[in-house]
Amino acid sequence: MNLLCSESCGLDQVGVRLADALARVGTGPRERILVTGGGCASSVAGPLEGARHRVPLGRSLPFALGLSLAEPDRQIYAILGDGEAAGVGGNHLLHAARRGDRVRVLVVNNEVLGAMGGFPSPATPRGGRTAVTPSGSAPRGLDIAEVTRAAGAAWVGREIVSAGELLDALLVEFATAPTFALLEIVAPCYPAFGQWNGFPTPESMREALERRAVRGRGTDSAGTPEPRATELRVGRLWPPPERAQ
């Protein structure tokens, strides 16, 4: 991912913000191990200090599980894109959440396989156009956060990349959350998605993403988020506030 692209999507700042959150909670480089796969999301690890492993795409979570067992005194972070989390590594995500693996997962969701030039990902919204699907993607997009919650994760959150202090606060909560924990950060990808869907500039795509973010709406009796169309319920999604005490 080149610098111009990272400035457009905001991923150049996600790693910086995560590093700041880890410093605020007192987690030093010797206390953590970072695991990344491929794609744009791997660039988030750039500003982070600590032992780092880059593994084949789709194998980040099994590798992270092994590290958590071999290094019980260190915190394990896996950084995935939506293609790995919901696609080639999706089964691993479900079972990691179900088992309660001692891993914290940060998913960068740009709703497209951006590093592959525009293939739709499992998270691409229905009707979303890419270079490979110029007439629009037919399937409904997968809600990564909700699927992870339903699988049994102890903590689930979601925020948009441009949320500023709200994202900072959620990153701090993520860094201290019980495991298995997943934080989904939704980011715009203008080259592979935005320009194919009527956005004239990267800024207009980011503004549209901000309008999709919904804060403060409740859950149903089962604690299930209530998304509408392409809206994104953001903040801590699980456990709900009354259960987080």
Image: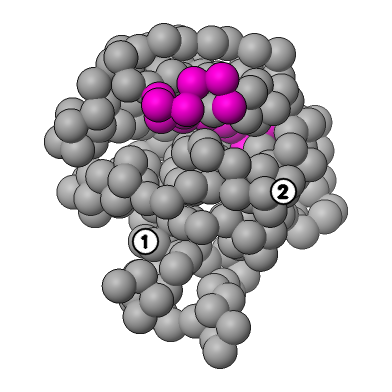
Please indicate whether residue 194 sits to the left or right of residue 2 in the image: right
- The tag on residue 235 is 1
Label 2 is placed on what type of residue?
A: Leu
Q: Is residue 32 left or right of residue 189?
A: left
Residue 80 coordinates in the image, percent (x, y):
57, 30
Looking at the rendered structure, the kind of residue marked 1 is Gly
Q: Residue furthest bottom?
A: 221
Q: Tell me the SS state at disc 1.
A: strand
At horizontal 67% and vertical 49% (from top left) the residue drawn is 99
The image shows residue 7, relative to residue 198, as above or below, that is: above
Q: Quadrant of the C terminus?
A: bottom left
| Residue 11 in sight from this viewpoint | no
The residue lying at 47 percent from left, 57 percent from top is 155
Give the residue displayed 52% in from the left and 39% down from the top.
Answer: 102
Q: Which mark is residue 94?
A: 2
The way the protein has been coloured in the rendering is one colour
**In the rendered image, the vertical position of residue 138 relative to residue 39, given as above or below:** below
Residue 134, disc: none
The answer to whether residue 237 is seen in the rendering is yes
Q: Residues within 10 Å of mark 1 (few under 14, many from 20)?
A: many
Q: Is residue 22 left or right of residue 9?
A: left
Could you say where residue 29 lies in the image, as x and y percent from the top left?
A: 28, 16
| Residue under the point 52% across and 37% down | 103
Range drawn in magenta = 69-84
Image coordinates of residue 238 in percent, x first then y, are 47, 65
Q: Which is in the foreground here, disc 1 or disc 2?
A: 2
Which image quadrant is residue 217 in?
A: bottom left
Instruction: Report the number of discs.
Output: 2
The foreground one among 121 and 48 is 48
Identify which residue, 116 or 180, lies in the foreground.
180
